[in-house]
Image (cartoon, helix red, strand yellow):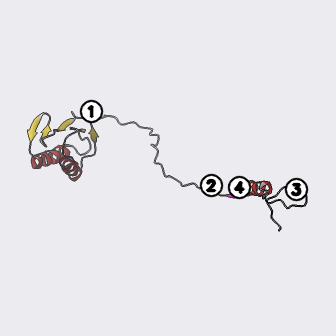
Amino acid sequence: MAFSSGSGAGTAMSDINVTPLVDVMLVLLIIFMVTAPTLSYPIDVNLPQKSINPPVNPQTPPEPIRLRIDASGQVFWNDTPYPLPTIANMMEVEVQRDPTNQPMLEIDASGDADYGILAKVLASAKNADMQKIGFVQK
């Protein structure tokens, strides 16, 4: 028998020598690591440009609008409760006052507030073309 498990002289060795296999695999790994192209994706970044003439009369920003949504779904505009359609109209009026110098809309949503109400408020702000929207964290 060619592969016997007995010990002694004249018996064939049944173990595989894996050292040459490991050496070949390490060499192949190094070759693939060196020759593999590095993946790079270009990202376009618009950096601010240097201006020689700064603006002469910088506008002071208007007071921010504090919009609060409580757990019951009530929406407060600067601590005064309003229905949601009225809030949308008020946002449009604020944007139309001065489209280049809009007030900051600070949204403070309760942790228990309905997500649907918040989504409607954000949709109203987008439809009114409000540019400055922030969330208040407590």
The disc, 4 or 3, on the residue closer to the chain's N-terminal end is 3
The residue where tag 4 is placed is 29
Disc 1 crowd rating (10 Å Cα; few below 14, some 14-19, many 20+) is few
Q: Is residue 36 left or right of residue 117?
A: right
Badge nearest the viewer, 1 or 3: 3
Seen at 9% across and 45% down, the residue is: 83
Indicate the quadrant containing the N terminus: top left, top right, bottom left or bottom right: bottom right
Q: Which residues are magenta?
A: 28-36
The residue where tag 2 is placed is 38
The disc, 1 or 3, on the residue closer to the chain's N-terminal end is 3
Compared to 127, does 72 lie above or below? above
Q: Amino acid at mark 1?
A: Thr
The residue where tag 1 is placed is 60
Badge nearest the viewer, 1 or 4: 4
Q: Is residue 33 magenta?
A: yes
How far apart, in angstroms, are the residues tagged by discs 4 and 3?
39 Å
Q: Is residue 88 left or right of residue 18?
A: left
Q: Is residue 28 left or right of residue 78?
A: right
- Residue 101 at x, y percent in the picture: 25, 40
Q: Residue furthest top?
A: 138
Q: Which mark is residue 8?
A: 3
- Element assignment for label 1: loop
Disc 2 crowd rating (10 Å Cα; few below 14, some 14-19, many 20+) is few
Indicate the quadrant containing the C terminus: top left, top right, bottom left or bottom right: top left
Looking at this view, is 28 or 40 the one in front? 28
How far apart, in angstroms, are the residues tagged by discs 1 and 4?
62 Å
- Element assignment for label 4: helix
